[in-house]
């Protein structure tokens, strides 16, 4: 039996997923940047004790990557570190100043900036120092996203009492499904881990291309829709980052920028690996952990909240308020 504190952490974790899901419903004017609306729930959770707050940031990172299908891709490390560090950074500011001197807007902006810096630093470990050139635009965008996130945290309110979660399936059916799901999940994780290691060590560009095709096939077999835009974003980000640092023979110049064969080849290989790992990881997006653990509970809350959000009427903010006001949530 989970304690009331753990249930609250699970519910708050579900809210981070709900806000991230709501962000996907908004038109994206800048396809390569995200507002990070999941942090709205973080800004509403500073009353938690330190250990439960850390647990919230960890569950937020793991659950969001599981839902998006990036849990076994390199993006998980970036998401995990920036979620925990930026969350603790904001939590530390709140406790240090005790709500004085710095408003929620300042805290949100600083948290967004911290997240952007961590994302660029970790990306540079794989892509090279060329990614540092993107730090300026990322910081500028974090100013905008921080303001939006803080504003939403002011107009949206979460219930003091954690809503009751009701499972509409019979207990015997649940037990049988959990056993089958556990075996399936273990097999899928092992297969994806082996395939991921194989992709990472490949150096031949043609073999990498073949691995990407197989990863897309695995994604289709898992009934996951292939979304081209995220892969285009990966390719643009990776190739531009590597081309900033010239290597080898100059192929041509573009606006005074020398495009070299060595940097281009490295960029293509890295982009192929990231795309293949991302597509492969999508195969696990539909998997849900069995049992009554906090991660499983978070995803159950999220599923119920999404049903309320999608079935409600009005604009997105009104529908979100309806979901937040629910006293009973059905899985």
Image (spheres, helix red, strand yellow):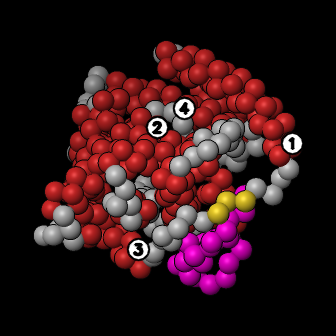
Rendered location of residue 108, percent (x, y): 29, 63
Rendered location of residue 268, percent (x, y): 45, 31
Considering every residue shown, the one lying at the far left of the view is: 101
Q: Which circle, 2 or 1, is nearer the viewer?
A: 1
Say few, some or many: other residues with alpha carbon within 10 Å of mark 4 (under 14 / 14 to 19 / 20 or more): many
Distance of label 1 from label 4 (alpha carbons): 32 Å
Is 326 colored magenta in this rendering? yes
Distance of label 3 from label 1 (alpha carbons): 41 Å
- Camera-side residue of 212 and 245: 212
- Element under label 4? loop
Residue under label 2, please give it: 76
Q: Quadrant of residue 308?
A: bottom right
Say few, some or many: other residues with alpha carbon within 10 Å of mark 1 (under 14 / 14 to 19 / 20 or more): few
Asked if residue 250 can be seen in this view, the reply is no
Q: Are marks 2 and 1 in contact (CB under 8 Å)?
A: no
* Residue 38 to residue 232: above or below: below
Is 322 colored magenta in this rendering? yes
* Residue 263 to residue 220: above or below: above
Residue under label 3, please give it: 152
Residue under label 1, please give it: 172
- Element under label 3? helix
Q: Are marks 3 and 4 in contact (CB under 8 Å)?
A: no
Q: Earlier in the sequence, mark 2 or mark 1?
A: 2
Residue under label 4, please give it: 72
Q: Which circle, 1 or 4, is nearer the viewer?
A: 1
Q: Earlier in the sequence, mark 3 or mark 4?
A: 4
Quick one: quadrant of the N terminus?
top right
Distance of label 2 from label 3 (alpha carbons): 26 Å
């Amino acid at each position: 039996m989970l304690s009331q504190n753990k249930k609250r952490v699970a519910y708050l974790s579900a809210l981070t997923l709900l806000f991230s899901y709501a962000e996907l419903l908004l038109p994206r004017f800048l396809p390569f940047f995200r507002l990070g609306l999941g942090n709205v729930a973080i800004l509403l959770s500073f009353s938690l004790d330190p250990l439960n707050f850390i647990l919230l940031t960890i569950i937020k990172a793991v659950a969001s990557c599981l839902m998006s299908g990036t849990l076994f891709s390199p993006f998980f490390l970036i998401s995990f570190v920036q979620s925990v560090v930026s969350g603790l950074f904001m939590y530390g500011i709140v406790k240090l100043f005790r709500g004085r001197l710095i408003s929620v807007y300042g805290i949100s902006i600083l948290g967004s900036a911290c997240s952007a810096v961590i994302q660029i630093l970790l990306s540079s470990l794989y892509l090279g120092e060329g990614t540092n050139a993107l730090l300026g635009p990322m910081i500028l965008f974090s100013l905008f996203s921080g303001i939006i996130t803080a504003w939403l945290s002011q107009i949206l309110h979460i219930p003091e009492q954690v809503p009751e979660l009701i499972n509409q399936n019979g207990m015997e059916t649940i037990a049988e499904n959990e056993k089958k799901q556990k075996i399936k999940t273990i097999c899928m994780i092992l297969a994806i881990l082996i395939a991921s290691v194989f992709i990472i060590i490949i150096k031949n560009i043609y073999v990498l291309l073949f691995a990407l095709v197989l990863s897309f096939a695995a994604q289709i077999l898992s009934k996951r829709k292939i979304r081209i835009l995220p892969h285009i974003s990966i390719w643009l980000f990776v190739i531009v980052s590597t081309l900033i640092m010239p290597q080898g023979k100059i192929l041509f110049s573009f606006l005074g920028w020398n495009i070299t064969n060595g940097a281009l080849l490295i960029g293509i290989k890295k982009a192929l690996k990231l795309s293949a790992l991302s597509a492969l990881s999508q195969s696990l997006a539909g998997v849900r952990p069995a049992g009554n653990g906090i991660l499983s509970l978070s995803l159950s809350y999220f599923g119920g909240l999404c049903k309320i959000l999608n079935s409600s009427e009005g604009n997105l903010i009104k529908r979100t308020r309806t979901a937040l006001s629910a006293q009973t949530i059905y899985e």
